[in-house]
Image (tube, rainbow, N blue to C red):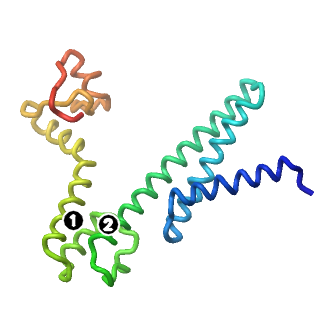
Amino acid sequence: MMTEAQINEIESWNQFHQSYQNQLAPDGPLEATLATEIIYAAWRLRRCNLSEAATDLTPDLQNAIDRVRNQAQRHFSRNLNELKRLQTERQFRLEYFPAGTDLSALGVASIREILPALANCVTLDPVKRENAMVKALHSVNNRTQNEDWVRSAKSDPATVQTPRNATCPCGSGQKYKRCCGTNAPAILGLAA
């Protein structure tokens, strides 16, 4: 027979699980798996906080709780980012492809892999197709913008002004402001 504390814990878990399921709204088995991993990581984070608040901690116990918390935060963040990516790509497909378009050949594809199929979609309004492609390429290009200017800075450093918070073009792996640009003035008007 279960104790009242165990029953309360099960009820708390059910409410916690249901609220996350409603918030994450997974569609399909892959998204459901990621949502489940997110929920378990969030529950572990909750339990770490409760454990710290409920007991006097020895240094060894505090270190163990910190390790579990760090691992749960990594799992939570990684799975949440992956779920967001999958849901964004699913929404992109639903929004920009006409109803009845067979996209089964694409499987779980990134936006870069979806764009050629979108370009070849004859039944789609040309203006809507062009807008969708520009929007998708813009989001993909924003991710690689930092890498592009680093490559150009390495090829011709005299012509490129390096943003202070960017990776230093000398290859040290540090931010420019902490490496070669320690005395460099701030660059205004550029997003770093």
Q: Quadrant of residue 44?
A: top right
- Residue 70 image point, x, y percent: 58, 38
Looking at the picture, how far across and down is residue 162, in whole percent? 17, 30
Residue that numbered label 1 is attached to: 132
Q: Which mark is residue 54?
A: none
Dividing the picture into quadrants, the one containing residue 146 is top left
The type of residue carrying mark 2 is Phe
Q: Which residue is painted at 79% across and 50% down in the image?
A: 8
Residue 92's label in the rendered image is 2
Q: Residues within 10 Å of mark 2 (few under 14, many from 20)?
A: some
Q: Quadrant of the C terminus?
A: top left
- Which percent across, then down, holds residue 35? 54, 59
Q: Residue at 60% across / 49% down in the picture?
A: 41
* 149 w.r.t. 112: above or below: above
Q: CA distance from mark 1 to mark 2?
A: 8 Å
Q: Residue at x 33, y 64 (%)?
A: 110
